Image (cartoon, coloured by chain):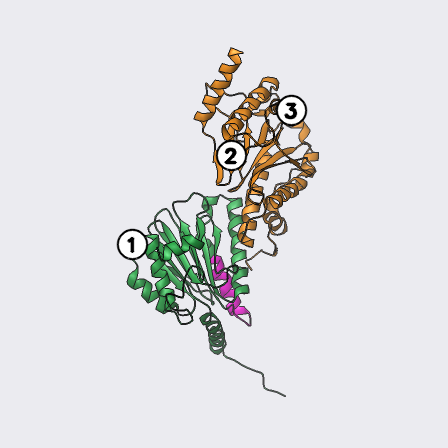
Chain colours: A green, B orange
């Protein structure tokens, strides 16, 4: 008779965490930071069609790094969740916090129950009347509430150091975008600063000066003017 | 992925039907012909040089009584299109809300907006869903119009209760005073040559004519300051025509008619 196979829960979780971290470390990072009238999100992304940053609702945006099919499914679930809440209550009742909680619940329960954890890190950002809310949700469901800026994905700690050194309250969109680009340029799998132009960067903003749906992608000439000008 | 989500497609309406059926209205269990509900009256659409214009009076009736004097019956749906409603106001306004969400939901999930044709088809679909309620007396008669970016011009679609979708080249009007408004428009409108101002003028005049002939269509109420809703969709977006502009056009028409 063979001996029953035993793995301690600590070992089991550690292995899963390591597995997830490896997958996420390969993903290109996303930075999000406040500027005077909103939040700018930026990621290196050479595809013009597969997105890392997307609109969820009027004042909420989503960022995902790691396995594309996994964060894409999470994004779609988030859009359905937000639209359903907005339909049954009112548009103003859709909040980033409850969405972040949903993501946290899903990621946490997959991490504890399933064989394979989700290899993703999720960012939910929201502009408020005053200031903003940035939630970072990790593969195991743990959630962090960030202030002023957030980074997710491989190399995100180093990116955070660059942003921390350069971020100022009330900075313009242009200054914020340049700081984000500078942070991304040095990342392990990113290129040099010159290599990161509007074609290789995915840029989006939540713009408080807009009414209704505040999410907007910044592309083409507008993006190059923002980054160089 | 989230609790209670099993549907995996791009339609908001079908998502609700699959996973949250309790949120969808069900009007099919009553015979509404015996019950008075709010009814919206005359709305119209005109193609003009810049795009498309939509207008509607503000009255809603409850049988022979005034239900509401300042109901909005023309709605901005997204950055390029509008929808105007006549018929049972409750289900119609609910349909507007669902249509707006359906298009926004698709755009967010799919990453790009539907084409003008695709949007019109979605509205057909929603009308077909309303058919059982329409059979019980809750008829919704919408017009869909806007700027078609692919074709580079304004376009209009009218619908029947089965969801049938029919293109109109120049103008259309529906509701209790729709026939009168069409009679007023047919002499002026055509060939998409109207300027913005001419189109607004034609719309206001048509609504005045409809109010003149049809007791359920609201006239321009200067005393209360209630003017028709007029919206224009152009290449750059959907804008409201201000009451001030409508008032001066109204006064010009009255002066012309007095002089005649």
Q: Which residue is mark 2?
A: B232
Q: Quadrant of the N terminus of chain B?
A: bottom right
Nearest to the eye among marks 1 and 3: give it.
Answer: 3
Residue in the image at 56% along x and 31% along y: B193
Residue B79 position in % (x across, y down): 51, 42
Q: Which mark is residue B158?
A: none
Residue B42 position in % (x across, y down): 59, 26
Q: Is residue A155 magenta?
A: no
> Which quadrant holds residue A31?
bottom left
* Element on which disc 1 rests: loop
Residue in the image at 58% along x and 56% along y: B5
Chain bearing mark 2: B
Question: Does A115 sit above or below residue B41?
Answer: below
The residues tagged by marks 2 and 1 sit, at their Cα atoms, a distance apart of 40 Å
Q: Which residue is mark 3?
A: B179
Q: Are marks 2 and 1 in contact (CB under 8 Å)?
A: no
Q: Which residue is mark 1?
A: A169
Chain bearing mark 1: A
* Element on which disc 3 rests: helix
Q: What is the span of residues highlighted in magenta in the rendered image?
A: A101-118
């Amino acid at each position: 008779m063979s001996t029953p196979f035993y793995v301690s829960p600590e070992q089991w979780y550690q292995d899963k965490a390591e597995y997830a971290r490896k997958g996420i470390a390969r993903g290109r990072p996303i930075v999000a930071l406040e500027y005077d009238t909103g939040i700018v999100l930026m990621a290196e992304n050479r595809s013009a069609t597969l997105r890392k940053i997307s609109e969820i609702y009027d004042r909420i945006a989503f960022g995902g790094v790691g396995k594309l099919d996994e964060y894409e499914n999470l994004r779609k679930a988030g859009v359905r969740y937000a639209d359903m809440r907005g339909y049954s209550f009112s548009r103003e009742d859709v909040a980033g916090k409850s969405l972040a909680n949903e993501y946290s619940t899903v990621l946490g329960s997959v991490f504890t129950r399933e064989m394979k954890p989700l290899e993703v890190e999720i960012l939910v950002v929201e502009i408020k009347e005053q200031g903003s809310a940035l939630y970072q949700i990790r593969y195991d469901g743990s959630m962090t509430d960030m202030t002023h800026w957030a980074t997710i994905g491989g190399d995100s700690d180093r990116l955070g150091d660059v942003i921390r050194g350069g971020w100022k309250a009330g900075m313009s969109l242009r200054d914020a975008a340049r700081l984000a680009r500078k942070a991304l340029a040095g990342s392990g799998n990113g290129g040099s600063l010159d290599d990161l132009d509007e074609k290789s960067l995915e840029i989006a903003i939540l713009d408080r000066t807009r009414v209704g749906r505040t999410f907007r992608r910044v592309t083409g000439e507008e993006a190059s003017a923002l980054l160089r000008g | 992925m989230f609790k209670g989500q099993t549907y995996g497609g791009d339609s908001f309406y079908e998502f609700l039907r699959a996973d949250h059926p309790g949120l969808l209205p069900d009007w099919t269990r009553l015979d509404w012909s015996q019950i008075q509900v709010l009814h919206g009256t005359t709305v119209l659409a005109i193609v003009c040089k810049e795009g498309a214009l939509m207008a509607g009076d503000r009255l809603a009736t409850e049988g022979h009584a005034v239900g509401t004097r300042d109901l909005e019956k023309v709605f901005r749906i997204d950055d390029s299109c509008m929808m105007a409603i006549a018929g049972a106001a409750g289900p119609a306004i609910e349909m507007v809300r669902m249509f707006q969400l359906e298009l926004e939901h698709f755009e967010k999930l799919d990453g790009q907006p539907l084409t003008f044709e695709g949007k019109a088809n979605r509205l057909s679909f929603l009308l077909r869903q309303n058919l059982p309620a329409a059979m019980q007396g809750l008829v919704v008669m919408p017009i869909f119009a806007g700027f078609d970016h692919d074709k580079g011009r304004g376009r209009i679609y009218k619908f029947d209760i089965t969801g049938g979708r029919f293109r109109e080249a120049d103008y259309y009007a529906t509701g209790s005073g729709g026939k009168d408004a069409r009679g007023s428009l047919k002499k002026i409108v055509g060939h998409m040559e109207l300027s913005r101002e001419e189109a607004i003028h034609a719309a206001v005049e048509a609504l005045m004519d409809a109010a003149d002939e049809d007791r359920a269509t609201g006239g321009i109420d200067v005393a209360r300051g209630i003017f028709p809703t007029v919206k224009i969709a152009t290449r750059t977006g959907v804008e409201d025509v201000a009451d001030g502009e409508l008032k001066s056009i109204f006064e010009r028409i009255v002066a012309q008619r007095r002089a005649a």
